[in-house]
Amino acid sequence: MPGVAIIVLNWNGLTDTLACLESLMRLDAADACEVLVVDNGSTDGSPAAIRNRFPDVTLIETGENLGFTGGNNVGLQWALERGSDYALLLNNDTEVAPDFLRRLIQTAEADPQIGIAGPTIYYYEQPQTVWSAGGGIDWQRGTTWMVGLDERDVGQFGETPREMDFVTGCTLLIKRDVLHKVGLLDDRFFAYYEDTEWCVRVQRAGFKIVHVPTAKVWHKIPLDARESSARVYYYMIRNRLLFLGATGAGLRPWLYALVGDYLRTWLSWTLLPKWRPKRPLRGIMVRAIVDAGQGRWGPFPAVQESGE
């Protein structure tokens, strides 16, 4: 098999990271893999524990939280320097089927036009319920969605790989040649939407994005994850606007986002009593839009932690 660099990003997630690495040790393609953990400035003792438990796993310590983009870019650069044929981004809060990587690689190797491949990702707490079977983009509204979200898998996705608009960076396999052509993740995003923008770049470079239904991963994301924290809400708004700008989206999705979504939501939260619990997020929304307009990227502003 081609050589694969598996990149696991860790930030104070020791328990999940150890379980993820343990599942990777059971891969039926383990001989073709090099596993790299990029530690993003953890303070929970992760580096020492990972070295002790998995001495054959390479560990790079960044010394600070570089975000999803910065941490994974460290790993992608390492993969390029190692000469790996593929790089796999893998969230630390996942566990994988032993054959998932082999299935992804077989699919990618079968078609030179495939640039990125991703598996079916299920909720860990409900192993037959889908979190992502690829993703879609509505360019008229500037919105994105996970295909199959919250559906029980009853075979509706078949077994044949199919083209998608994007696959989530939770588990994403990219070819070395494609990485050379399109570059690394856009570090302005820090976290969220960076994978979608990356997939758009790959498609525009002439490659396919595919979902491989028979490759399976389980993600320890809460079932109510859509109830976002202030931090996630900030990133989702600001980075949606960054995504529209980075991809050259037209006027219509901008108007829909700013007026059809954000202004309407702000008015609803302000005027309707049933949305009173959401009112503290109004300031987060405004700050995210202003930051996007002024080109302020990177990590979530600390002052916003309290909703001020």
Image: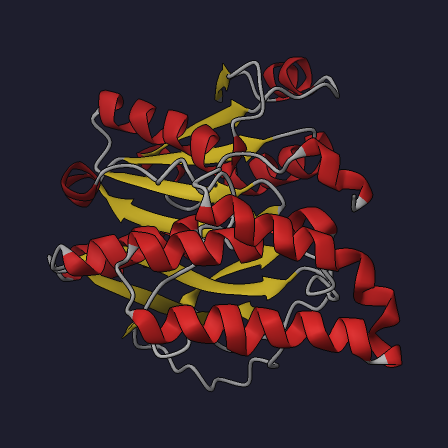
Q: Image point 56% across, 74% down: which residue?
A: 261
Its colouring scheme is secondary structure
Q: Nearer the viewer, residue 287 or 216?
A: 287
Q: Image point 23% across, 53% down: which residue?
A: 201
Residue 56: image location, x then y, percent: 48, 19
Name the image quarter holding the N terminus. Answer: top left
Q: Nearer the viewer, residue 58 or 99?
A: 58
Residue 30: image location, x then y, percent: 40, 38
Would you place residue 60 above or below residue 80 in this image? above
Q: Image point 33% across, 55% down: which residue?
A: 245
Would you place residue 297 above or below residue 240 in this image? above
Quarter of the image where one finds residue 262:
bottom right
Q: Is residue 96 visible to us here?
A: no
- Left or right side of 260 for 187: left
Quarter of the image where one finds residue 308:
top right
Would you place residue 82 above or below residue 284 in this image? above
Q: Nearer the viewer, residue 187 or 255?
A: 255
Would you place residue 85 above or below residue 55 in this image? below
Residue 135: image location, x then y, percent: 42, 69
- Left or right side of 67 for 209: left
- Left or right side of 244 for 65: right
- Left or right side of 36 for 19: right
Quarter of the image where one finds residue 268:
bottom right
Residue 289: image location, x then y, percent: 54, 54
Q: Image point 72% across, 59% down: which residue?
A: 282
Q: Is residue 272 visible to us here?
A: yes
Total marks shown come to 0
